[in-house]
Amino acid sequence: MSEEEAYEFVKGTLKKERITPYTEDEIPVINSVSACINCGLCINHCPVVAAVGVDVFSGPRSIAVELSRSPPEYWATADKVYLCTGCGTCREVCPKNVDIPEVVNIVRRRIFEHRPDLVPKGLHAVRETLRTHNLAFEPWADIKEKNESREMRLERLELPLVPDRHVSDAEVLFYPGCQAEERSQEVREAAKIILDHFGVNYTLLEDMTCCGLPARLIGDDATARSLTEKLKRDVLATGVRKVLTTCAGCTGNLSHISERDHWDIPTQHLLEFLVEDVGMERLAESLGKGTKHEDVTVTVHDPCHLTRHASRHIMDYALEILSLIPGVRVSASALHDSCCGGGGMVSYHSSEVANAVVSENLVAIDATGAERLVTPCPLCTAQIESNLFKAGSSVEVDDLIVFIAQMLPKE
Amino acid sequence: MTEDCYDVVVVGGGSTGTAVARDCAMRGLRTLLLERDDIASATVGTCAGMISSGLKYMDEPEIVDMCSQEVVHFNHIARHIIMKNPILTPMLEMSDLSTGGNFAEEYSKRAATRDVPPVLFLTPEDSRAIEPSLHPDIIASMYFEEFFIDPFRLCLLQALDTRVHGGEVRTYCEVLRIAKDPDSKCYSVDFYDRTTGEMGTVLTRTVVNAAGPWAPRVAKSAGATVEIRPNKGAHVIFDRRIVNVGVVTKAVDGRMIYLFPHENTTLLGTTALDSWEDPDTLVATQDEIEYLIKSIEFVVPRIREARIIRTMEGVRPLIPTWKIPEGEVSRGYEVIDHESEGKPGIYSFTGGKLVMARHMAEAVTDLVCKRLGVDEPCRTHEKPLPGNEEDVDIEELAREYGVSLHALERMRARRGTEVREILEMTREHPEWKTTICTCEPVIEAEIRYSIREEFPQTLNDLRRRVRLGTGTCQGTFCTYKAAAILAEELGLESDDYLVDILDFRAERWKGIRPVIRGEQLAQEELAQGMYACVGNLDQSDIEYEMKPWEEGM
Amino acid sequence: MHMETEVLVIGGGLAGLVAGTRAAEAGHRVLLVQKGHGATAYSSGAFDVIGYLPDALEPVANPVEGLSVLAQVYPLHPYSIAGFPVDVESGGESAVVLALVSETVEWLKDRLDKTPAALSGGLDSNLVAMTVLGTTKPTCLLQKSMVSIPEMEGEEDGVLLFAGVRGYADFAPGAAAKVFLRDRMMNKKYPQKIAHCQVRVSPSGTDYNISGVEIARHLDHPGSIDSLAKELAVYIDQFGATDVALPPVLGIQNAISNKEALEERLGVRVFELLGLPPSVPGLRLQNSLEQMYLESGGALLRGHEVVSYTMEGDRLISVQTKGPSREIQISAQAFVLATGKFIGGGLSGDKDGVREIVFDLMSVTGEFVSAEEASPSRSTSKLAVSPLGQPVLSNGVSVDSFLRPVKRNGLEWTTNLFSAGSIIAGYNYATEKSGLGVAATTGYTAALRVTEYLKEVAQNE
């Protein structure tokens, strides 16, 4: 055999034995998982275990000491590993900060490669959408209908329509993410309103494409990489010095890929930009003038992708901003930082699990006596809103960015 | 009184002893195996489990032929406990190639019979694509394929098959004396039963001494002589598969060592030092540990980042050839017929390797049969070992019984078709679907099945059968849970329950202590927190028997 | 991103949270940065102060006696160092140490009183707690859902029922019953009528693979205690039980009220046993301590690890912390290092030695020689579990009489870094049964020293 034939043969054997070599960026994750001492603290805090029990979801502990140890048998983890919402609560409480959410992705990657028949059907559907449209949601076929939907939402929320901004000398890029682009358009609009109000020199992308997080969560490494490559090209072509987003999932993912792929520009959630760049003084001035939220009690939900994939202090910003709005009282939920179940793509194939995860949150939300719930993530918003509705609750849900935009004086 | 006479008593329950007992029983001989500890508790229990086609024996082509054929037999009779071991031998210098020379030829000649490719050569780029952790400066690598077998399962299945064919297996029975019985033409074998504390005697026409490192002692107890060259070897074990394929390389002193991913761990081995220490007291030394790590570091530079969970140390009973380096000692085996010493019907082994166990058994069983006038052919290479009868559909079973896929897959790797019987137990006792060892994982049903069918006396014995406590936490969490199950199944007293816990902690610590560092320090703090701080077992007043390796602080 | 505070506590276990709370109560602005949970969250429900003196084979008669001996005979034990008399007229070493530990314990009992981790007991006597293994251990305080065995010893006709939960493998009532019975017979104490049973608590509808936290969460829901009571009643009746021992899963929030409800309904004493990780009592303790800290006005930053620091002269100025994907620089006037041992991540070891992770402070063994070149495997005992313990677990940083980590020359590394908890060398909490007591006392004391330091700094300015 020639050397090329030899290599092909060996690759074939590895494929038959279901072995996929670890890549460079997987090795630090595997090293972190090696630190697990099997103590099970993660089990005490995992929201999926809390919802469905250790028998259904053996939990982060088992993922660390058991499910991630035997590469040729990764396929045998398929009945557990897709139930992880990726919230990162386990990693945060772990004495060793074992990186369970990332090892879940590594395992899913291998199942996708070697046993795609075991990947839940609902995920294949999303994958198709990603590969066809470079978006995680099916885009509107008719742009007119998309705009009509947008106008209806803006009208209901009493928000003005600010024109899109595409400039070549922008300082920052505003990246709404797939959900705000194609579904929760009010979030995209609200961000524009805010950026416009504070005179930020921002631009949008001509072609808004997915940051790749859903592909990573499905285990489709190839699609994830091609999406992140495209996004890097498009982002760097704008020449901006910072990327802003209104989606917690995008915040976490963009922070990860911008470092991994050497974008060399920071990515932030809009909340961070508002507090750190615009500043509390200007915020106080602008928010103090608005009249929309005269007398309302709100409760806040902390998106896991902000608190546990970016940093906890970002939600301190949310509270600081809310404190600037006269007439708004914050009533903290005992489970404000407990996962809403919307992550990890769980709701695409096991919605009963995702909804079981959020069910305790609903009780705690109810106990706050708040009329509204605000959260800076369209995914959490959708998940909590639909579950509150199903539970017959009167609590209404707003994306925090929309809530803030509503407070700004109208020009 | 010849009616109470066994045809053969086999001393030693390692790979050879259990193979002999199986062959004898299958040929209709009245067979008894006496093992002073547990099945596979010595040499074969501390080896890597490789059934190699002869990396070491290229200078002995007949042996290579034999091993190659034995691999084929194993694949037939024990397919369910065999795993493929693809191996890369990376080379950093041209001189690394010359060691390969003869090997590649000899290996490739017989490759087709074992259904593996001939030795292949890969470019450095391709090598690193297959195994990214290899050193960037490698110039090429050689690729070939070998097989692993689970040594514990092999020995246990051979023992169980012995019983199936009417033979008896008794563990914790130490042979003390073998003497000609004055009243018959048989030998009387006196032994001490460590579980009951009682002495026993049986009569037998023949004795096969398969006691490995203790072969000289057993021979002496029969008034015969056996000499071996005892040679110890250590392994370092990592918590998970840290390389994708096996890596073989030249060690610090030019010997070959290996880093093999093995089930859900990785084994780094092995050393070879002549040693006359009592095998029961041996633990891996700092020299051996650093020797192994330093050696593999040449080709896997980031090895020190990986987590080591334990070490193990065992003794090889080599054929006594002196004044040559250990590496030049033949790895074949010898059968000694003690007739020349006036002890006809007593046979001893020296040398041998795991892969030859069945062949060794056949050779000596032929002798025994000839002596007894029994004319039965050997069929040990034809009849599959228990559990290997057919494939098992894990996904179907997971659905039917509601047990996790991974737990079943790991169980299947150990037991093949026995999985079904174990799951049947959960119909009446659904609570036995509970995971007891979370590292592996092992469910309660498998533990109870093993206790009922596979005669473990201690948690350590259970460990050999179900891999309890072999994971990253090294039994921190499963020890007390499994001890309660063992106590219940065997009806043990409370002292025994606590002693079982302490004994297993001691046995695990034996392997952890020499190499404790990094994450295992946190693991040990946790274990101390549980068993000492909370459980207060450090202050327990139960009678704890010091283990051989614990004596002499 | 930059934050500024007066007192920065590094580490969010019992030591750090006590230090932070005490400092906040003293009026300081406190920020506590927590990388993850640690050994505190594994707590069995017992609060150890001193169970056994170093190398002892008998428990101390009571913590007061134990502490007195430590103060006189083991001057480098953390209790002794914490209680180092700054004022020699205060009545001798023992008196000072006792006063300090007593103050700490009373303070902590008070702060935890309305929480799920409320404690009963005191320094003047050791309680004897029972574990899920059926063994017993001396301890100082117990969570109120638990009971000290001597309370049962008066009843000659007492019948103790160990009740396990089917499918919950962390507690085997049969094994525990046998172990405890043996203990009773050997020590000629009551109760000597022991029974065991399994009840069904099925939070997710199955009878297998049930974790403690699921049971506890389930029992927190109002009304769920009813079916447990019904099941227990059957066995209590069958065995004539007067006392029922349960694994520590009676609830996360409501264990104490659940215990009381069961006692009222069943007419017998009901209590929880000490549990092994991942324990619910530990969860209660960790949650309650964090709540206590937040209520005192302290700020908590989770998920961040200190990765570097800046110094100016002999003072620590700031630290750099790393979160999941953000970095925050935190400057402070005074710092408390309460990072734990190997579990908590304060110390790490490789084949050659043991190192302190955050500031690379000098690390020492329990004998106060350098641990940096002391191979961990040589700092261990051949015996896995014995009163000798594992010497490597006594490693840590050496501190001066103000609880400040010191350098090789014995002087403080900086004037404003203090230390608390198991990062401190010189004791073995697993064999002494002294973990939470040392953590709380050194945490409490560190806060006092911080206040003194800041007052001094303010005066000098």
Image (spheres, helix red, strand yellow):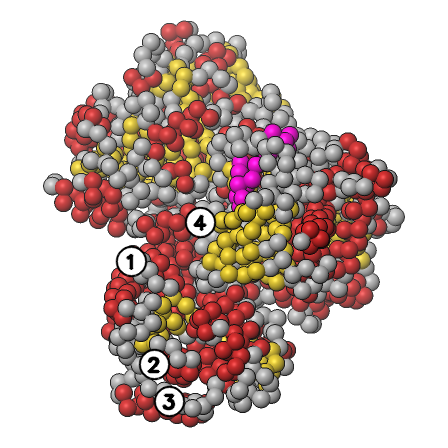
In the picture of the structure, the residue carrying the numbered disc 1 is A113
Residue B493: which quarter of the image?
top right
Q: Residue at x 31, y 77 (%)?
A: A204
The chain containing the residue under callout 1 comes to A
**Residue B400 at x, y percent in the picture:** 44, 61
**Residue A268 at x, y percent in the picture:** 41, 68
In the picture of the structure, the residue carrying the numbered disc 3 is A161
Reply yes or no: does residue A280 show up in magenta.
no
Towards the viewer: B281 or A126: A126
Helix, strand or loop: magenta stretch? loop
Vertically, is A144 above or below B382? below
What is the CA distance from the residue labelled 4 to the residue labelled 3? Answer: 47 Å
| Whether labels 4 and 3 share one chain | yes
Mark sitting earlier along the chain (1/4): 4
Mark sitting earlier along the chain (1/3): 1
The chain containing the residue under callout 2 comes to A
